Image: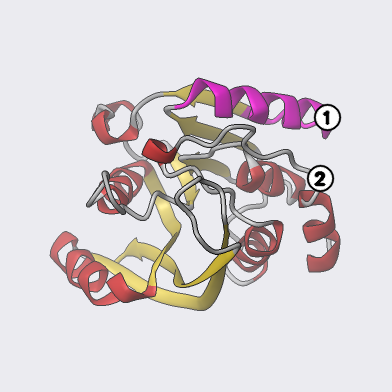
Amino acid sequence: MKLKELESCLQQVDTFEEPKILLEQYPTSPHIAACMLYTIHNTFDDIEGKLVADLGCGCGVLSIGAAMLDASMCVGFDVDHDALEIFRRNAEEFDIFNVDLVQCDLCHLQEEKYAKKFDTIIMNPPFGTKHNQGVDMKFLRVALTMANTAVYSLHKTSTRQHIQKKAEDWGVKMEVVAELRYDLPASYKFHKKKSVDIQVDFLRFSQA
């Protein structure tokens, strides 16, 4: 599947009807999702035939894209029942059956339950603004316990040095796969601008 074709398919994925500010629910754009997945698939061969987990999966754009690229199974984890319902509808509309959904709070997940259960983790975690400071690192810590091969994640470029230090502390290798511009559309009442560009790193973590 070509990149443009994948992005075109992902444009059909429904997103949040009423996003919840406390959960920092912002949809991953079809463009960014397609670029992430295409790179993971073609550069690192970490999707096809692999068991993939999507942490903070929201409405499922990353899982659905991974399923289209022939992941053997995708499991989406999210705390929000409403988002998982939209994910379920999306999967049905695309006739995708190799996905499963788990409703849970990833910040309080029993690590041993899913330890090393997945080949690849993909995620666009909450960036940890306002009410959720540090939540992005909690997601990353959990992801690293779950992955056998690699974790792929989006993080603000401004936090790169902090994350690099954490990766070293945890004994994992971090590489910057790409620098992206995350176009954040106005989703909440307090947003004054129609959209804001945020500099974001697309990172890959693997055992050092």
Q: Which amino acid, by three-letter code, is at mark 2? A: Gln
- The quadrant where residue 165 appears: bottom left
Residue 3: x and y, percent? Answer: 78, 67
Q: Are marks 2 and 1 in contact (CB under 8 Å)?
A: yes
- The quadrant where residue 106 appears: top left
Q: Is residue 92 magenta?
A: yes
Residue 73: x and y, percent? Answer: 62, 35
Residue at 53%, 37% in the rendered image: 19
Residue 190: x and y, percent? Answer: 45, 50
**Residue farthest along the left direction in this orientation:** 169
Q: Which residues are magenta?
A: 80-99
Residue at 39%, 24% in the rendered image: 104
Check disc 1 and report the residue beneath it.
93
Tag nearer the camera, 2 or 1: 2
Q: Secondary structure at mark 2?
A: loop
Check disc 2 and report the residue beneath it.
12
Q: For this rendering, which residue is in front, 117 or 63?
A: 63
Residue at 73%, 38% in the rendered image: 14
Q: For this rendering, which residue is in front, 88 or 190?
A: 190
Residue at 31%, 36% in the rendered image: 115
Instruction: Residue 180: give its label.
Output: none
Judged left or right of residue 63, residue 151 is left
Numbered label tally: 2
The crowd level at tag 2 (other Cα within 10 Å; few <14, some 14-19, many 20+) is: few
Q: Secondary structure at mark 1?
A: helix
The crowd level at tag 1 (other Cα within 10 Å; few <14, some 14-19, many 20+) is: few
Q: Which amino acid, by three-letter code, is at mark 1? A: Glu
